[in-house]
Image (tube, rainbow, N blue to C red):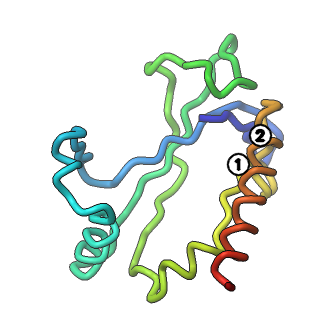
Amino acid sequence: MNAHRFITGDGVRRYGRYRVRPAGANEYLDGAVAATHARDFLFDEIRETLAKGPVKIRVAVQIAAKDDIVDDATAHWPNDRREVPFGTIEMLSALPDNEAAQRHIIFDPIPRVEGIEPSGDPLLDLRADVYLISGRRRRAAGSR
């Protein structure tokens, strides 16, 4: 996962990586169990879960130590790095036409908000370009 430079209101700069986890327990399926489910089972499951109430996802930032590599997403940081709570995402419902909406969503790995900057990883710009091209192709395919 890419690191970003986080800047506080008083100008303190720290590098960190997002950590995104469900508010509840994690569930993992091994390959054999996953193979017994329908291809889109997670889409069906999230609709059923949301019908019972909101789903919350916790977002934290793992803070880099002085010598951690911050401009290479393949460089691992030790698990003992401090994590700072960053926020909570709350999903209330699924989009009624989720498949059409997915053709318009583009993931951008470069932060475009004040106070969060890219780390200098040279792959960030390339990834952003590839995701933009992919999004354009999905939208074009959906309009045929």
Which amino acid type is shown beneath numbered disc 1? Pro
Q: Quadrant of the N terminus?
A: top right
Q: Quadrant of the C terminus?
A: bottom right
In 3D space, how far apart are the residues under numbered discs 2 and 1 (Cα atoms)? 6 Å
Q: Residues within 10 Å of mark 1 (few under 14, many from 20)?
A: some
Residue visible at 68% across and 85% down in the picture = 143
Residue visible at 33% across and 54% down in the picture = 23
Residue 114 location, x and y as percent? Answer: 81, 55
User: In front here: 117 or 137?
Assistant: 137
Residue 73 location, x and y as percent? Answer: 65, 28
Residue 67 location, x and y as percent? Answer: 68, 11
Horizontal side of 5 relative to 63 (left or right) equals: right
Horizontal side of 42 relative to 136 (left or right) equals: left
Q: Are marks 2 and 1 in contact (CB under 8 Å)?
A: yes
Residue on which disc 1 sits: 109
Q: Secondary structure at mark 2?
A: helix
Which amino acid type is shown beneath numbered disc 2? Leu
User: In front here: 71 or 40?
Assistant: 40
Residue 58 location, x and y as percent? Answer: 43, 53
- 12 over 35 or under it: above or below: above
Q: Residues within 10 Å of mark 2 (few under 14, many from 20)?
A: many
Residue on which disc 2 sits: 124
Q: Secondary structure at mark 1?
A: loop
Residue visible at 50% across and 44% down in the picture = 60
Of all residues, the one furthest to the front in this rendering is 144
Q: How many marks?
A: 2
Residue visible at 16% across and 45% down in the picture = 33
